[in-house]
Image (cartoon, rainbow, N blue to C red):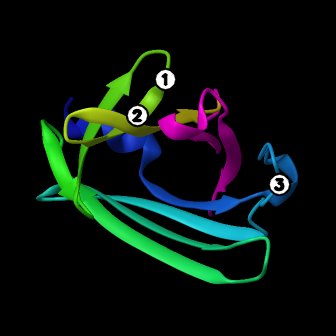
Amino acid sequence: MTPQDLVPYLGAWVLDPAKNDYPGGGVPTAGRYTLTETPEGLHFAMAWTDAEGEAHEMEYTLQLAGRSEVQGAQVELAVEARGGLVTRVYVQDALVAEATRVLDPDGRGLAIGQRSVAEGPTWKRSWYAKAD
């Protein structure tokens, strides 16, 4: 993967709660997702309000090659033709979670799918619009 592969994903994205699909409920009511390139790799900054109205934030940076340590887990970053920008989370070399980020054809929308392996094949899906 090269920094050029990341360019379409960079920038700020705003959650559209009406387009989300969270089996079992718990759809966030608001959110912002920002991806920036840094000398260390790809920086993720997320802020969201959950279904109960509680605010959350999370930030981390992933190397462009190999695995990065995030909160005691190893996270791998890839750009894949079908899956878009993909992260896979491993604990003791076992896959525990994964997420995909796929751009709309016009590059103005970002569909994010995420799942926990422990919860089975069910994916939570969120949709973000490019912030202007």
Q: Which of the two labelled residues, at mark 3 and mark 2, occupies the earlier sequence position?
A: 3
Callouts 2 and 1 close, C-beta under 8 Å: yes
Where does label 1 land, which residue?
83
- Asked whether 106 falls inside the magenta stretch, the response is yes
Q: Position of residue 66 (x, y in %)?
A: 12, 36
Distance from Cα at disc 3 to Cα at disc 1: 24 Å
Q: Secondary structure at mark 1?
A: loop
User: In the image shown, does 95 or 43 lie closer to the viewer?
Assistant: 95
Q: Position of residue 104 (x, y in %)?
A: 65, 32
For badge 2, the amino acid type reads Val
Residue depicted at 82% across the width and 54% down the height: 25
Is 79 left, or right, of 32 in this rendering? left
Q: Which residues are magenta?
A: 105-132
Badge 2 crowding class, 10 Å Cα cut-off, few under 14, some 14 to 19, many 20 or more, is: some
Residue depicted at 64% across the width and 26% down the height: 105
For badge 3, the amino acid type reads Gly
Where does label 3 land, which residue?
25
- Please give the label number shown on residue 86: 2
Location of the N terminus by quadrant is: top left
- Asked whether 52 falls inside the magenta stretch, the response is no
Q: Position of residue 6 (x, y in %)?
A: 34, 40
Distance from Cα at disc 2 to Cα at disc 1: 6 Å
Closer to viewer: mark 3 or mark 1: 3
Q: Secondary structure at mark 3?
A: loop
Badge 3 crowding class, 10 Å Cα cut-off, few under 14, some 14 to 19, many 20 or more, is: few
- Please give the label number shown on residue 123: none
